[in-house]
Amino acid sequence: MVQRKRVMGALVTATVFMSLVAGCGAKTTETTSATTAPQATKAAEAAKAGDGKVVVGFSQIGAESGWRGAETQSIQDTAKADPTIDLKFSDAQQKQENQIKAIRSFIAQKVDVIAMAPVVETGWEAVLKEAKDAKIPVILVDRGIDKKNEDLYTSFIGSDFIVEGQNAAKAMAEHLGDKGNIVELEGTVGASAATDRKKGFDDEIKKHPNIKIVKSQSGDFNRATGKQVMEAILKSPEGKDIQGVYAHNDDMALGAIQAIEEAGKKPGSDVKIVSIDGIKEAFEAVKAGKLNTVVECNPLLGPQLFQAAKDLKAGKQLPKWIKSNEDVFTGQKAIDALPNRKY
Ligand code: AHR
């Protein structure tokens, strides 16, 4: 009888845990060292969240770009290689509501640290207050949230998107010899990566009065939308006379390159292209003469994330912003760097 009660207890715990995860409406996977235990036992074990490991729940935005794929890979690979880490990974499939559900699930599982790449900057207050009340530190990875909620997270690991935008503008001005009409393909509306890359670029380009942004539109950080938006712009009156395209990420630039070629123009020469990220395909496009400058944004954040999580568990203080080191690649410099690109 006692034995039966114990089995029932374990099953209830496992069911509660699994419905929490299933309730996320997003893909949640676990990267743990225990792979052979039957599912119910595994779930019950995970529900205990502890056994000496640092348990990290990470809510990823989705898989909208090559850069995002590289970031996911870096986080999953780093966790797999480290026996002291227990990663609970959740893919929000581009939806903020899925990220919020995942964070609530991590809180219920009593993870040590919550990490997330916030799809947009606003709308996090309530759920991050819940994490704070549960005394679970939150690390923002790669994208930020609005400034008024800075007390709701411990640390941000990632790039300076404003500087990336400024660097893109400097490169564009050089390619254009200081004059011309350009199109800006923006990232996801409301994402810090889009807002700040726009601010950095637009402010810097204003220093060049003979360069005009004739059209600025979101391509949602993905290749297919980038291509569609560029096709429409090329058919519009503003699109008839353009000499440059600035894309907030490589995927949209690669989509735009296809659209420009299909419209009978030469990307890289008729229309100069500058984009941000630094995926291999963008370097290949530079080599092919179709893309002019790639501003690097580092997605390989796994090692920094888990070091930060371990430090937090050990009671150490983290800097508010752990910045990535990045470079700018034009012409031969990009071609030389291509064989060693890691993503
Ligand atoms: O937040 C970083 C941006 O998000 C990357 O530039 C882009 O490719 C991704 O989707």
Image (spheres, rainbow, N blue to C red):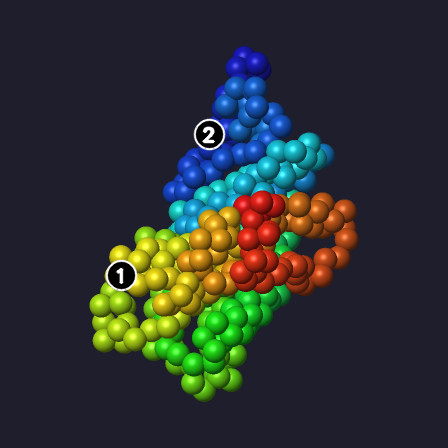
Q: Is residue 327 left or right of residue 257?
A: right
**In which quadrant of the rendered image does the N terminus lie?**
top right
Total marks in image:
2
In the foreground, 283 or 216: 283
**Is the residue marked by circle 2 packed among few (<14), some (14-19), or many (20+) residues within 10 Å?**
some
Residue 334: x and y in percent read: 56, 56
Q: CA distance from mark 1 to mark 2?
A: 58 Å
Residue 260: x and y in percent read: 31, 61
Instruction: State which mark lies toward you, 1 or 2.
Output: 1
Seen at 23% across and 76% down, the residue is 237
Seen at 50% across and 23% down, the residue is 39
Q: Quadrant of residue 188?
A: bottom left
The residue wearing badge 2 is 15
Residue 181: x and y in percent read: 37, 77
In the foreground, 184 or 328: 328
Residue 203: x and y in percent read: 50, 80
In the foreground, 22 or 238: 238
**Is the residue marked by circle 1 packed among few (<14), some (14-19), or many (20+) residues within 10 Å?**
few
Label 2 secondary element: helix
Instruction: Mark yes or no: residue 118 visible.
Output: no
Q: Amino acid at mark 2?
A: Thr
The residue wearing badge 1 is 264
